[in-house]
Amino acid sequence: MNFPPTEQSHSLHDYRARGGYQALEKALKELQPADVTKEVLAAGLLGHGGAAFPAGRKWGVIKPNDGEDHFVCMNADEGEPGTFKDRWILEYTPHLCLEGLILASYAIGGRHAFIYIRGEFDLPFRRIQAAVDEAYEAGLLGKNILGTAYSLDVVVYRGAGSYVCGEASAMLASLEGRKGWPRNRPPRLTVKGLYQKPTVVNNVETLANVPVILNLGAVEFKKTGTPKSPGTQMISISGHIARPGVYEVEYGYSWEKFLYEDCGGMQGGKALKCIIPGGVSTKILNAQEIKGVTLDHNSAVAAGSQLGSGGMIAVAEGTCMVRLARVIQRFYHHESCGQCTPCREGMGWMERILDRIVRGEGRPEDIDRLYRISNANDGTTICSLGDSAGYACTAILDHYREEFEYYILNGRSMFDGRLAVDDPFDGAVPAPLYHGVAV
């Protein structure tokens, strides 16, 4: 995917001039569906939506000729705070992920595929819908694609802005016209998914890697990255960073080099306080904890967090972490779907506690109470929203408990004395959609 965007890079003409749809033609005319799955599995492609589950293993559960209807759903509901790299792909190279969607559908024997896109995405929606329309006109979708026996129809479906619908089972419920609530598993979605039929859900960036793998071959693809994290990761970085934007980074790349050289360090020459590595659902790491750490899944986990969805937020020294925790918790409480009692009640309880602290009315027992609520949520909800909200709060408490204690004791922040109703990112410059590539 390493190329600069242009005014026409979203068009079919531009995409085909760069070799677009050659992988699809090769697959349809030279490979069996199972061969496509084997190549993706051999390449070690990990999911780029947050969980990093191997895409080939997910596809391999479904047998192409078992007599069932099979579906593929592209998860374009990018709602994780701090994450906007899928938006970049949808706006500037929509045919890349569309080709990946068609290849995934062919691999599992699917005849219908869906693109579930966030309702607030206007330009990305128009770009991906236009790409689908162009593909139909060019014979790349519909009946007898490229003159072969394979046929596929694709529907672009706009969500209504629910964060929870980024979770795969909630997304499928929304596609079916029901309330977007997650569901208990098993059965897995690859066994009973959309309309109770075997379904693969992959995010935008994951599918955008599939044509690359088919064009290069699994062996060549694995030469980039690390043995356990092959390939590259798109990272959207924002916050107090000097050069925010979207970067494509080879797995195994130095985290410090990325932050201090490629992204220019902190605004105004300030010191880095901490990083939210992969969207606010991932635990923060302070400046000391990222020393010597590389940008790959195993290294991030060893450091105590995850790369998650690739949405990195840089936080500079001088930022009040009590205020930041309150902003994060307010988001989670607002986005809880309300299905599970621990999440529905726990998120509101945690937000009220943090609200009270920032009003200068905190109590000494509030810190331990936040830990207890988080522990009560852990593993007791259908999806991971309740868990993630608790982890995000307790990770901040683990690192910066003294700031909470000071706030409770003095009724104000230890940094500037302002009540914590202010934006903790006040002064941060907005991120451009694309800034550069670091490889």
Image: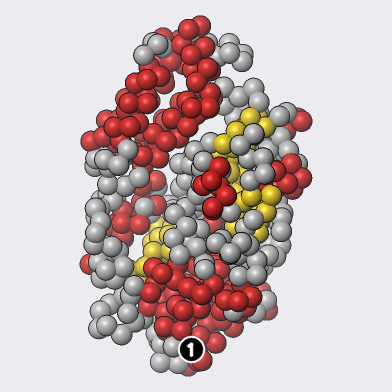
**Could you say where residue 388 lies in the image, as x and y percent from the top left?**
40, 40
Left or right of 292, for residue 368: left
Residue beneath disc 1: 31
Q: Residue at x 33, y 75 (%)?
A: 62
Mark 1: few, some, or many residues within 10 Å (few <14, many ≥20)? Answer: few
Question: Is 414 in front, or is 257?
Answer: 257
Q: Quadrant of residue 359?
A: top left
Q: Amino acid at mark 1?
A: Leu
Q: Residue at x 37, y 20 (%)?
A: 368
**Could you say where residue 338 lies in the image, as x and y percent from the top left?**
26, 39
**Could you say where residue 220 lies in the image, as x and y percent from the top left?**
64, 75
Q: Is residue 139 visible?
A: no
Question: Is 395 in front, or is 279?
Answer: 395
Q: Is residue 255 above or below residue 93?
A: above
Q: Quadrant of residue 352?
A: top left
In terms of secondary structure, where does tag 1 sit?
A: loop
Q: Is residue 418 above or below residue 93?
A: above
Q: Is residue 387 visible?
A: yes
Q: Quadrant of the C terminus?
A: bottom right
**Could you say where residue 109 lies in the image, as x and y percent from the top left?**
36, 81
Q: Quadrant of the N terminus?
A: bottom right
Question: Is 211 in front, or is 232?
Answer: 232
Q: Is residue 127 above or below residue 80?
A: below
Q: Residue at x 53, y 23 (%)?
A: 400
Color theme of the render: secondary structure
Q: Residue at x 28, y 62 (%)?
A: 188
